Amino acid sequence: MAKRKVPDQPPATKPYQPTEQELTAAKAHLARRRARVSAPRVKLEPLPGGGVCIGPDHPMRALWALALEQVFGTVSADFAGLMLDELAAAVTIDRDTIDEQTLNGILGAMHGINPGDEVEAMLAAQMVGTHLTAMECLRRARAPGQTFEGRDMNLRHATKLTRTYTMQVESLKRYRSKGEQRVVVQHQHVNVTAERAAVQVTGGVDPAPEGRGAASKPEERSHEQRLAHAPEPPMPCPEPARNAVPVASREGAGPLSIPRRR
């Protein structure tokens, strides 16, 4: 009886060994996760008459309610419930088709923005809704079979929404700073060397700072200073005695004699 040949078994693959950079990044991320409190999560519970109810995904409902209030920067359970209901309605068309993962992602975004009061919570909720709507317009612009007009309309809407989102972020920054303006005073120090000060006082030549030209030597500067302060000789007057014109006195008028040159 012939023996059946057993096919060659593929060699066992070795488990993946993470690199040093991957291990370092994973440790840093885990440390950051341990330092931050997790955002509260929700789960959808079906109702007997149809529809769903947003319930806590936590074993203790009281602790979940406190965490939800903290996410929306309030101490009012009614305000926190109102904001959660508005966010759920803003990202869904039908109440029965709420995406649980999307709603938990929105709570994570609100937890990251960390509003400090009700005004910041409402502005943060608008930011999240604006971002999601802008991404939806971009998705529709790239949908297969989209017409040129439909693509252009969705792109224009997405552009407006992204600009609105930027304005909302700036508004949140201004509100958090309470309109405070910071004035930065910078001191500028001017150092004047003794050599430059002496040149400026005596009227000499600038020793060419910042490497502009070669500085003059001490003997050249002293020679230039002597020339600058040397008295100028008077201009010669051509034959002042022969060209003098007598001026008539007030006591009597006499003839004027103008000597001529020979």
Image (cartoon, helix red, strand yellow):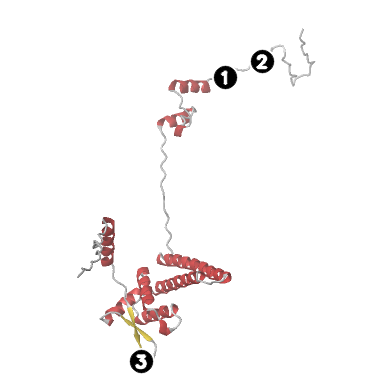
Q: Nearer the viewer, residue 260 or 21?
A: 21
Residue 115 seen in the figure: no
Query: In the structure shown, which secondary structural element does the residue marked by tag 2 occupy?
Result: loop
- Circles 2 and 1: CB atoms closer than 8 Å: no
Q: Residues within 10 Å of mark 1 (few under 14, many from 20)?
A: few
Query: In the structure shown, which secondary structural element does the residue marked by tag 1 occupy?
Result: loop
Q: Nearer the viewer, residue 238 or 22?
A: 22
Q: Which quarter of the figure is the C terminus placed in?
A: top right
Query: Which x, y percent locates residue 152?
Result: 56, 68
Query: Which x, y percent locates residue 89?
Result: 43, 80
Q: Place residue 179 in its image quadrant.
A: bottom left
Residue 95 seen in the figure: yes
Mark nearer the N terminus (3 vs 1): 3
- Return the residue at label 1: 232
Residue drawn at point x = 42 percent, y = 65 percent = 173
Q: Residues within 10 Å of mark 2 (few under 14, many from 20)?
A: few
- Circles 3 and 2: CB atoms closer than 8 Å: no
- Return the residue at label 2: 237
Query: Which x, y percent locates residue 19?
Result: 27, 57
- Return the residue at label 3: 48
Q: Judge depth for marks 3 and 2 and give the one in front.
A: 3
Mark nearer the N terminus (2 vs 1): 1
Query: In the structure shown, which secondary structural element does the residue marked by tag 3 occupy?
Result: loop
Q: Judge depth for marks 3 and 1 and give the one in front.
A: 3
Gap between marks 2 and 1 measured at Cα: 15 Å
User: What's the amino acid at mark 2?
Assistant: Cys
Mark nearer the N terminus (3 vs 2): 3
Left or right side of 245 for 151: left
Residue drawn at point x = 42 percent, y = 55 percent = 183
User: What's the amino acid at mark 1?
Assistant: Glu
Gap between marks 3 and 1 measured at Cα: 116 Å
User: What's the amino acid at mark 3?
Assistant: Pro
